Each structure stands twice: as structure tokens, then as C-alpha cells.
Image (cartoon, rainbow, N blue to C red):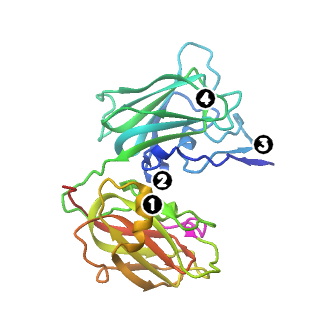
Amino acid sequence: MATLLAPIFDIPTYLQPFTNLADERIGAKIIDCSDDFFAEAKRMLNADAPIFVEDKFDDHGKWMDGWETRRKRHAGYDWCIVKLGVAGKIHGIDIDTTFFTGNYPASASLEACYAPHDELEQAEWIDLLPNSILGSSQHHIFDIASNQVFTHIRLNIFPDGGVARLRIYGEVQIQLQKSDQILDLLALENGGRVIAYSDAHYGHPRNLINPGRGINMGDGWETKRRREPGFDWCVLALGQAGKIEKIEIDTAHFKGNFPAQVSIQAVYVEDATDPQLIPQSMFWPFLLEAQDMQMDHIHSYINPVLAHEKISHIRVNMIPDGGISRVRVWGKVTATV
């Protein structure tokens, strides 16, 4: 049973600062759909790239990694309503039809609404993407020009067919319950993102900000064995600037390959471009001086966290190499002015 992996897709540079609001890992879910006879709509929100399993069939026919409806035999079109993982301003979308070759929709449109309490019957749906032509087995990137905050989207496909993945790239709007609420300001669901890194041979640093604890050694940031002086590092942006009170470094599943030490540098900057941050990060002041690591362990730091009024970016130094599962940076959101 041969399995094909989707080719690695590079997100356009201008969308890389944004979070996929339709990522199931941060709570995105299907609310309703017109039909998902051939393939469940929830597969469309999977964070992993789609796959194609050549000889895999189920009771409804060919198994496909995505959302697929039956062939329509009457007027109309299919639709799917998604509750975004977090509310946000939408800047771009990717309707991915990878591996859907003779069964992709002819076209698609997208609507969105703001309904924080799921009151969809009273919600006002806004047209974000007009009916647009789709093609066979490819990514379709569309820019969205809107400054509104949305909680739900409705994908309409004409007249039927399959979509492998739906990505909604947007600017997270953190919903604070109270002004002094403590949040993991680095978390994916709060808008954290990776800017740059020295090496990601075995695991990408984007895993550091994923929800929950790592599920295995592949669900973390792991570099190759260093054979030269120095150490590995990655630069990350917080979702919103804040004052940090607690740091957690989790080496879950890393037992023979955890770092000897980890340190964290931090800075507050406004409107800096990512390329500018990388060389400057070497000279940022420390938020956490180098700390000895243990295997498969959550390391919590409160007293060792050095005082900063607020920070917007951190640099994690892994000395000299190895693997970390998660980094949590707990603090309070502070005003940027």
C-alpha cells in the first residue's frame, strides 16, 4: 500500500508572520457542513500536510485526506462552517486541493462572521472571497482585504468535490478575560511564531509553541549533533508584548539528546523586520541565564527570570545542541504605547 506525501510547500513570505486560525491544534473545529460522504470535513483542518494512500478504501469508496462531498445530482453547492481556533483578522487563505485531481471543486468562495458565543443564526456573514476558480492538486493562495475580527468562516465549493486542507492566515486577537490575566504569550494560539533558527535537522522549532506536551521526540525542536564550536538557537516573536513572570522549558521525550543548558535572551522592538532581528539577537539582554537541563522534564523558572518592563521577541539558546519539546513564556499583556 503505497503512501505519497505532499511536496513541501513554502508559505508566501508576506503570510509567514500570521497564524493559521483554522488549525485544529488550537481548537478550530467543524460546526456543520452540507455533506462529507466521501471524506470527513474535519480532515481539512489537520495541521500536517495531506497524504495519498494508493490502495486505501473505506465503505464509501476511495479514502482521501481532506473534505470530499458526493457528486451533486441537483442544483446547488456544498458548504462547510468552521469555528476558528481563535478570533482574528484574516489576511490570506490557502485552499489546497493536493491529491484531488479529478474530484476538486470547480470554484470556491469564502464568508466570515463574528459570533463569539456561536450565535450563528443572528450573525452577519461578510463576503471575503468571491467565487474563484480552483485547479487540480495545488495550493490556491488568496489575499484578503479586511480589518474586521472574525470567529467563524464558511467555505462554499461549487458545485461539489474535495479540498485537502484549508488554511486561514490571520492576526490573532487575544481575548482577555481580565486585564491582569496571565497567558503563555509565546503560544501558537496566542499568536507566537518562529522567525529564524540555526538548525532544524530532526524537528522544527515551530513545535516549541504547539499546544499541550509533545507527543513524541519528533514533536519538538531537535538539531543535528554539533561538531564545531558554538550552540544552536532560534528567534521567536510573542503574540503580544508582555511582562514575563514565569518560564517553562520542557524536554519531554528527549532523554539521550537533551541540551546541556538553555538560556533565553529577550528584547522589545517595534516595527523591526525579521532579517534585522537575527544579527541583533546575539546582543539582546538575558531573560533567563543559562540553566542546566534534565532529560524528559518540565523545568519551571520564576525567581531566575530577569526583570524586563516588556518584551516582544525572545532568542532561545540550546547549548550546545539537542532537543527541546516546548517553551512556555507566561506573562501579562502590556500596552504598546
Element assignment for label 2? helix
Separation (CA) of disc 1 from disc 3: 32 Å
As helix, strand or loop, the secondary structure at mark 1 comes to loop
Q: Which residue is mark 1?
A: 211
- Which x, y percent locates residue 210? 47, 60
Q: Residue at x 53, y 20 (%)?
A: 77
44 over 303 or under it: above or below:
above
Amino acid type, mark 2? Arg
Residue bearing the label numbered 4? 69
Give yes or no for contact between labels 2 and 4 (Cβ–Cβ under 8 Å): no
Tell me the chief SS of the magenta region.
loop
Residue type pointed to by label 4 = Thr
Which residue occupies 63% across, 67% down? 202
Distance from Cα at disc 1 to Cα at disc 2: 7 Å
Residue 212 is inside the magenta segment: yes
Per the model, the C-alpha gap separating discs 4 and 3 is 19 Å
Which quarter shows the C terminus?
A: bottom left
Sequence-wise, which precedes: disc 1 or disc 3? 3
Which residue is identified by label 2?
25
